[in-house]
Image (tube, rainbow, N blue to C red):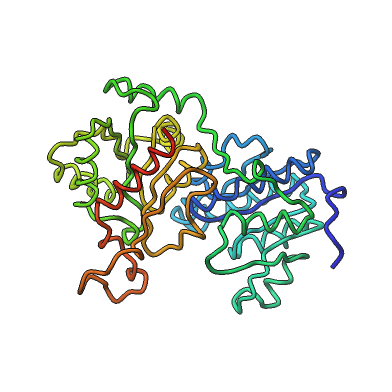
Amino acid sequence: MTAIDLRQVERVLVIMLRHHGDVLLTSPVFTALKRAAPQLEIDALVYADTSPMLLGHPAIAELHCVDRAWRKAGVLAQARGMARLVRRLSQRRYNLTIHLTTHWLGAWLNRLLGPRYALAPDFQKAKRSGRLWRGSFSHFYPYRAGPHKHTVAKNLDAVRYLGIEPDEEASRLVLRPGEAAYAAARRHLAGRGIPEGGYILVHPTSRWKFKCWTESGVATLLDRLAERGWPLVLTAAPDPAEMAMVERILAACTLARPLDLAGRLTLPELAALIDLARLQVGVDSVPMHIAAAMQTPCVALFGPSEPSEWGPWQVAHRVVSSRDFPRPAGEAPGDPKYRHSLVNVPPEAVLRALDELLAERP
């Protein structure tokens, strides 16, 4: 294969069809590319619901979306939606596409768009080593699977393959909530007289229940923080299961009366509130990555995931891992993903991590 010559490239499409946190962790790819080659027009293709993670990124020219609702609307609606998308992407005449996952749509789009260069990770997996997959790309960059290398660093390997070595500043996460989000966040805080920079935001939920801490643990943490006089903001996604979990946590609190914004925020508004917070506490989920992007110190609880691969990136933080505590007898279900659930993490460990972080960043 001949090398990819960025002097021969005018427009780039970066494809990341994954969840919110995965999309945010690609934001340095755009920064690094634009700084190394300012002449490039760099577009992104993501799922529509994850687009707030990249909206307003200064290095992105156009943000294209795949709407998951197309599938629910039926085969015809999905076909029409995809046709409109392909038509718009074709009009952009990309010279280079960078596909960062194993999603088959990226492979099919390369065949339809016909870019001069098409780059993807060399996954070395049987399901992505066949002729159909490999024939959809012109170049493959080395991919290191497994833990001990952060996901951001893995994404940036695509940029390194192009001869670009991102510095620390170019490697930072980028998220721009926007002025409307900050105005909404300040209205919420003003309604309870909570000062900017003087509260702790707790986001205890995740779309994956096995990543969540115990409700009693969260309630105890909130009560202990309230004893210390901390104003508290409690957030969660509008998912019914997450909302129900927050209701149970609040019912278990004996002292804490946090500002309950569960299910009431857009993603940009959540990002603005995390930016204005003194500290964020939560589990391995997108608010933790948002805290890293906003440079808000955070305490992150990790169960089944590997912190070295998914932990807070380039921000002051503490990780509390279930692997550091003995497992209670009979508490581990048979499913391997529950092997390191957070049921064994005591509130004292989270408070200790929080105190260390506050002392480190007064």
Closest to the observer, 231 or 31: 231
**In the displayed structure image, the side of residue 24 where residue 13 appears, left or right:** right
Q: Looking at the image, which residue is at 63% across and 71% down? A: 123
List x then y, in percent, for residue 19. 49, 53
Residue 8 horizontal/vertical position (percent)? 87, 50
270 or 136, nearer to the observer = 270
Residue 361, how many percent across, how many down? 44, 36
Residue 237 shows in the view? no
Quadrant of the drawing holding the C terminus = top left
When asked about the image quadrant of residue 297, the answer is top left
Q: Is residue 158 above or below residue 220?
A: below
Tell me the quarter of the picture where residue 156 sits. bottom right
Q: Decide if residue 27 is on the left or right side of residue 159.
A: left
User: Which residue is located at x 50 percent, y 32 percent?
Assistant: 177
Q: Position of residue 68 (x, y in %)?
A: 48, 52
Nearer to me, 138 or 319: 319
Q: Residue furthest left?
A: 254
What residue lies at 57% left-to-right and 41% top-to-bottom? Answer: 54
Which residue appears at 28% of the width and 55% of the height? 213
